[in-house]
Amino acid sequence: MPGTVLPFAVGLGVGAAVALLFAPKAGEDLRSDITEGVNDGVNQIRSTGKELKRKVQRLADAAQDQVDRVQDAIEAGETAYSQGSKKS
């Protein structure tokens, strides 16, 4: 999905700009519409970026939890091996 958001947003912006350029409007109205369309696109991209950042952070946190668990398991195994070796 992240790979399709940016091309979609760019296509949407280009399509909107082309539609506005061919619409019969005064120059000031046209510039206002283009500015509004660009601002909407930028806001959508920012929103999507923030959501992706949150998702990546959650994945990174989950991965770190797994790394911590593996490290704890390794340490427990080393401790058990060390204690077992001393008893022999």
Image: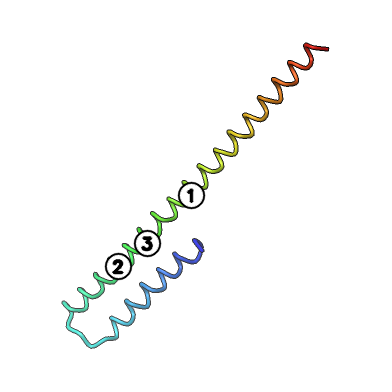
Residue occupied by mark 2: 40
Locate residue 53, reporting x and y percent: 43, 51
Task: Give the residue drawn at x 43%, y 50%.
Answer: 54
Locate residue 55, reporting x and y percent: 47, 52
Q: Which mark is residue 44?
A: none
Residue occupied by mark 1: 56
Residue neighbourhood size for the residue with mark 3, other residues' Cα within 10 Å, grouped as few (<14), some (14–19), many (≥20): some
* Separation of residues labelled 1 and 2 (CA atoms): 24 Å
Image check: 79 left or right of 63?
right
Identified by mark 3, the residue type is Ile
Q: Which mark is residue 45?
A: 3
Identified by mark 2, the residue type is Asp
Identify whether 60 is placed above or below 84.
below
Locate residue 50, reporting x and y percent: 38, 54
| SS type, badge 1 | helix
Image check: 2 left or right of 71?
left
Task: Give the residue drawn at x 83%, y 12%.
Answer: 88
